[in-house]
Amino acid sequence: MNLSKSLSDIEPLSFPSIESGSPIVIAGPCSAESVQQTLDTARALSAIGVKVFRAGLWKPRTMPGSFEGVGDKGLQWLQAVKRKTGMMVATEVATVEHVRAALDAGIDILWIGARTTANPFAIQDIADQLQGHDEVTVLVKNPVNPDLDLWQGALLRFSNAGITRLGAVHRGFSSAGAHLYRNDPQWHIPFEMRRRAQGMTILCDPSHIGGKREYVESLSQLAMDVGFDGLMIESHCDPDHALSDSAQQITPHTLQTILNRLVIRSGAPVEDELSLLRQQIDDCDHELLAVLARRMSVSREIGRFKKAHNLRVVQPARYQDMINARLDEADSHGLSRSFIERVMQAIHEESVQQQLGLE
Ligand code: PEP
Ligand code: MN
């Protein structure tokens, strides 16, 4: 078996789209709840042009006692959606039993949920089960934790198992504390994924990032502006009464309004002006790197001094003063304090490493 596949070998997915040149749209309820709710939602979505229907059957819930999905019996409902609307159908799989049942039922697209992507044993079991099934499309959501390599590793396990119809879904990352969004987008992670896998289809799931229906439109537009290939959006015929993720689901009618208002930007760079601006970015980055190299060399100098005088490498009071001073300076440049705090923390961490590594 060829284990040397890389993400750059993954080819773009071709899904039927609403109209030619429009982004891929996968829509449907968080969970299939009843045959009625599944078919009502699917018919309404098909009527607005959606070609790929999603519905969770086996739901990985954080808390026991939440609605855990209807299980195998929902497979017939998805088959009915396929028969009656002609849409492709997608569901989440998390175990080999789910995979077997979904393949037997002819489900077109299997997606791997964020909690499963975080577990390489589970991913390998699922990939082994899918070996030889290159008719099926597999979409891998990012893991719950912001670990790009874990996401990449999961994609490679499927690629190594011979799955060629493979794509990724960005759904944000769990984080402690109160945040605007349910799952912190940390956009740099999908951007880096794009750099590593230029041809691979990467979708954005604004529903699970935002966690509230009022954020779906702006996050969808943002996803289009930064070059995602499409959207996976939760849509339910009666969102207020949904058995899971009620707050973030939108009606097919609202979805239609959002899709109609989406502005799709060109992927082709407008050469002259853009290349001048890119040149400026490159210049700034060269300066940044040169300054960082100089700063690290001063850090090593300090490290030698501390060692010679038997001083501790980390001096908390000095560190705190330094951070406070930089945050004040950030204000005067109109830079975000939280951004500068993260940058300074990363620089400080590296400078401590440099000092510790001195011979
Ligand atoms: C879902 O798509 O309904 C779901 C459970 O997603 P995630 O794995 O992103 O939480
Ligand atoms: Mn959901």
Image (spheres, grey):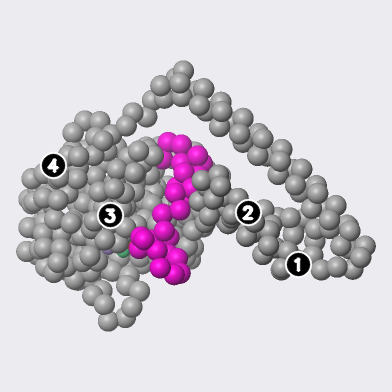
Instruction: State the residue in front, 292 or 124.
Output: 292
- C-beta proximity under 8 Å, tags 3 and 4: no
Horizontal side of residue 308 vs 148, given as left or right:
right
What is the quadrant of the C terminus in the image?
A: bottom right
Instruction: State the residue in front, 19 or 238.
Output: 238
* CA separation in Å, label 2 and label 1: 17 Å
Single out the mark in the foreground, 3 or 4.
3
Give the residue displayed 72% in from the left and 68% down from the top.
317
> In the figure, 117 relative to 20: above or below?
below
Single out the mark in the foreground, 1 or 4.
1
- Crowding around mark 3 (Cα neighbors within 10 Å: few <14, some 14 to 19, many 20+) is some
Q: Secondary structure at mark 2?
A: helix
Q: Residue furthest right?
A: 308
For disc 4, the marked residue is: 49
Q: Which residues are magenta?
A: 173-201
N-terminal-most mark, 3 or 1? 3
Observer able to see residue 72: no
Magenta stretch secondary structure, dominant: loop
For disc 1, the marked residue is: 315
* CA separation in Å, label 1 and label 4: 61 Å
* CA separation in Å, label 3 and label 4: 22 Å
For disc 3, the marked residue is: 215
Identify the amino acid type marked 1: Gln
For disc 2, the marked residue is: 326
- C-beta proximity under 8 Å, tags 2 and 1: no
* CA separation in Å, label 3 and label 1: 42 Å
The stretch drawn in magenta includes residue 321: no
Q: Secondary structure at mark 3?
A: helix
